Image: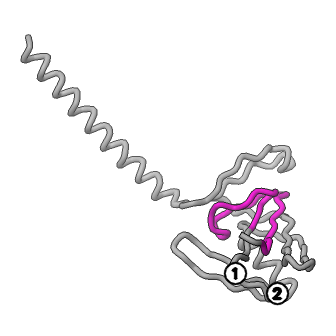
């Protein structure tokens, strides 16, 4: 009887290991199909979308958002744009207002290093906020939704 329970214990352990390995394989396959590294997915109420279906980061999201640039010296630029990401919002406003921007591309995404005559350096640099909350990922990976307010602020760190 002891031998059978030992074999049953080993057999059960083997089945558990096989299921865990198979589960990880399936999960990796699903993630590679989705392929959305570091994209923020936020919950929004459907009433904000005027009875439209909630967009997901995999859908093409081109809707009206407000974007502003605060240069930290009293100079501000504001506009309305139809874009998908925080970086695209900045790029569109900068193009419309003829403001130069400079960026650096990293493996985690784009970092804005200069807007107009204000460059990152020392204790100051560019940050972005969406609806008053500071971004925690690269601007080109932060998906925005209808009615969002994007702010680019030249600020002391």
- State which region is magenta: 128-155
Q: Earlier in the sequence, mark 1 or mark 2?
A: 2
Residue at 68% in and 82% down: 121
Residue 150 in magenta? yes
Place of residue 32 in the rendered image (x, y in percent of width and height, measured from the top left):
45, 58
Q: Nearer the viewer, residue 60 or 11?
A: 11
Q: Is residue 52 above or below residue 58?
A: above
Residue 133 in picture, x, y percent from top left: 76, 56
Q: Are marks 1 and 2 in contact (CB under 8 Å)?
A: no
For the point 82% across and 87% down, the residue is 99
Return the residue nearer the eye: 27 or 132. 132
Direction from residue 78 to residue 104 in the image, left or right:
left
| Secondary structure of the residue carrying numbered label 1 | loop
Where residue 145 appears, x then y in whole percent? 77, 58
Q: Which quadrant of the figure contains the C terminus? A: bottom right
User: In 3D space, how far apart are the residues under numbered discs 1 and 2 (Cα atoms)?
Assistant: 16 Å
Q: Which residue is mark 1?
A: 120
The disc placed on residue 99 is: 2
Front residue (pair 9, 76): 76
Image quadrant where residue 74 sits: bottom right
The image shows residue 21, relative to residue 16, as above or below, that is: below
Q: Nearer the viewer, mark 1 or mark 2?
A: 1
The answer to whether residue 60 is magenta is no
Q: Is residue 38 left or right of residue 81?
A: left
């Amino acid at each position: 009887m002891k031998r059978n329970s030992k074999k049953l214990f080993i057999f059960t352990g083997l089945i558990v290991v096989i299921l865990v390995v198979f589960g990880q394989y399936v999960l990796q396959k699903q993630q590679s199909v989705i392929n959305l590294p570091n994209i923020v997915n936020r919950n929004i109420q459907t009433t904000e979308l005027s009875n439209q279906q909630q967009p997901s980061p995999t859908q093409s999201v081109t809707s009206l958002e407000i974007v502003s640039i605060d240069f930290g010296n009293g100079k501000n630029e504001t506009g309305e744009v139809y874009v998908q990401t925080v970086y695209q919002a900045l790029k569109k406003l900068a193009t419309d207002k003829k403001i130069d921007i400079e960026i650096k591309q990293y493996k985690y995404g784009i970092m804005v290093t200069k807007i107009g005559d204000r460059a990152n350096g020392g204790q100051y640099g560019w940050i972005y906020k969406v609806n008053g909350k500071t971004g925690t990922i690269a601007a080109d990976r932060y998906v925005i939704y209808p009615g969002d307010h994007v702010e680019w602020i030249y600020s002391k760190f």
